[in-house]
Amino acid sequence: MATIKIQGSSGGSGSVILTAPSTNSTRTITFPDEDLNLGNVGGAGNVKAFASWDGTGTVSLFSSANVSSVSDNGTGLWAVNFTTNMTSTGYVTAMNVGKGDAGGDLNVAAHYRSEVDSTARRTNYVRCCSANKSNYTSFDHGIVDLSLIM
């Protein structure tokens, strides 16, 4: 049977020692003296914001984190406004829209640039859009999901 021993010191550092049977060497993992975010194992990034909303009619959020509101910018066009600004625009967005009423076709979603502003990503919001896959016309969806990872 393996054991885990967590031990601190008066200097503020600590260590976790994992011991397995049938081994003749010591294996030690040392953690920093701070809370660990296991969602960032391997440097993959953390979800900094997410939102799920009804994109038809008046936009209404189903659920969200670090999103103050979603602005309706036209058919199939939205701006997701952050409660706390991102530290840079070097984030990744992942969007999903449901199979809608647009002829039963699967639909596409992405962040977009406008003719007025060539930047889709800002530290205080991100623009996103959805369209019918068969003809790429903008389309409002009943369920739109967005995650932002940094």
Image (tube, helix red, strand yellow):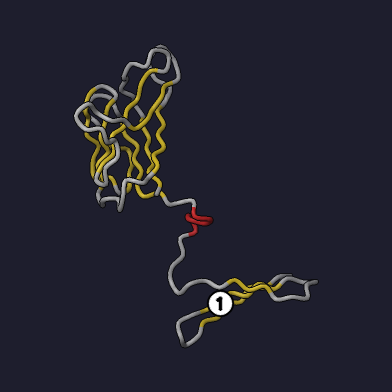
Disc 1 target residue: 15
Quarter-wise, where is residue 60 in the image? top left
Q: Nearer the viewer, residue 34 or 65?
A: 34
Q: Nearer the viewer, residue 73 or 150?
A: 150
Q: Where is residue 100 shown, x and y percent of the image?
A: 39, 20
The residue lying furthest to the front in this view is: 118
Quarter-wise, where is residue 28 in the image? bottom right
**Picture residue at 36% right of the left edge, 50% below the top:** 48
Quadrant assignment for the N terminus: bottom right
Q: Is residue 38 above or below residue 117?
A: below
The residue lying furthest to the left in this view is: 116
Q: Where is residue 135 shown, x and y percent of the image?
A: 38, 12
Q: Where is residue 87 shown, x and y percent of the image?
A: 30, 53
**Picture residue at 33% right of the left edge, 16% below the top:** 137
**Picture residue at 25% right of the left edge, 35% below the top:** 79
Q: Is residue 112 above or below residue 64?
A: above
**Picture residue at 40% right of the left edge, 28% below the top:** 97
Give the total number of marks visible in the rendering: 1
Q: Where is residue 58 shown, x and y percent of the image?
A: 22, 28
